[in-house]
Image (cartoon, rainbow, N blue to C red):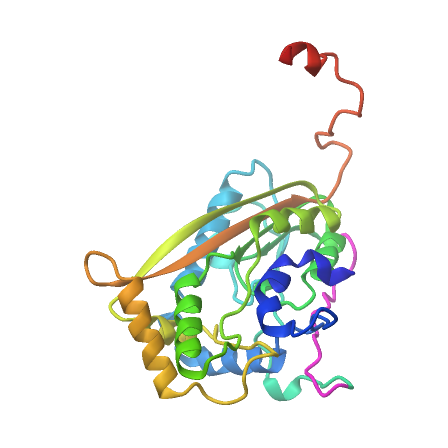
Amino acid sequence: MQLSVRSWQILNYNMFTMTSANRQLPTTIFDHKRVATHKQRAAANFSAHDFLLREAAQRIAERLQEVKRDFSKILDISGHELFAEISGLKNIESFSCYSRNHRNPEQIKMDPRGRPEDDTILGFDKNSFDLVIAAGGLHWVNDLPGMLVQIRRVLKDDGLFLAIMPGGETLKELRQSLEQAEIKITGGISPRVSPFIDVRDAGSLLQRAGFALPVVDSDVLNVEYEHPLKLLHDLRGMGETNALVSATKHFTTRCVMMTAMEYYQEHFSNAEARVVASIEFVTLTGWSPHASQQQPAKRGSGQINLGDILQ
């Protein structure tokens, strides 16, 4: 089952969607019409709030500087153009951008169930690019394993895929604060913060998609704010607010929100009385297979008996 490899869906959604042992996980996690609406709303003042995306883009650029080869045909699927960050690369012949997150919400079609279609098909020919990069956007994809397969398909042999996604530690303080406030006020929990990818499962996803030499690492950035409402303002300004299909359809009450903000300040303030928000950057690197790449040794080809060493 395709969804079984998406542990961030399973681990974060079982408390919200599993009311019995036989209940099935939803096949659609994110409402792409809501994602598009949020992005459209944020577009006018996006540059005032996009510091996390710029940080991710800079990290992509730094990683590429370490790769000693040229990439002539590049595809950016970030949802925001990274050309300025990677313009120092040599011999770029073409730079293509792809984004489904910045569509006009009115142009999104509905499926037979009345839900927005997950229109994330990469409309490029096989073996089209030397490099595919993403510094955001992939965390809104419902079928991430399928998207990775498509990325692998459009890469040329020995082509590179390099992406940054938010990891499981991201916004953990906000998630806990909202949960505790809802439990206190309403006696239940509703999903309000998106589930994010786990480092171990990111590597498995790359392998399942057919990437060679997969590498995944993570780093947590702590962002400080005077007040947690400032964090919510930035998230709204980036178009990164709640777009879960299973989210409640009504506005959060003032009582729940104020209780959450009080909990946040009480439990996640530092010595300077500023609140901290954790942002985990998970970096995924994988290559399209090629005969010139380093290959693992064949099973049984070792010349040293491990048992003799451990005696």
Foreground: 272 or 119?
A: 272
Foreground: 311 or 124?
A: 311
Name the image quarter holding residue 180. bottom left
Name the image quarter holding residue 74. bottom right
> Residue at image x 42%, y 58%?
279
User: Residue 306 placed where, x, y %?
Assistant: 69, 15
Q: Is residue 140 visible?
A: no
User: Does the stretch in magenta take in 59?
Assistant: no
Q: In screen coordinates, is 60 left or right of 294?
A: left
> Residue at image x 46%, y 50%?
59
Segment tinted magenta in the rendering: 113-127
Q: Main secondary structure of the magenta part?
A: loop
Q: Is residue 287 visible?
A: yes
Taking 35 as reference, is 77 above or below it? Answer: above
Q: How many marks?
A: 0
Q: In screen coordinates, is 257 left or right of 108?
A: left
User: Residue 105 placed where, x, y %?
Assistant: 60, 85
Q: In screen coordinates, is 230 left or right of 22?
A: left
Foreground: 289 or 297?
A: 297
Q: In which quadrant is the N terminus drawn? A: bottom right
> Residue at image x 68%, y 74%?
28
User: Residue 170 placed where, x, y %?
Assistant: 46, 60
Q: In which quadrant is the C terminus drawn? A: top right
User: Residue 195 placed where, x, y %?
Assistant: 55, 65
Foreground: 54 or 265?
A: 265
Taking 177 as reference, is 216 above or below it? Answer: above
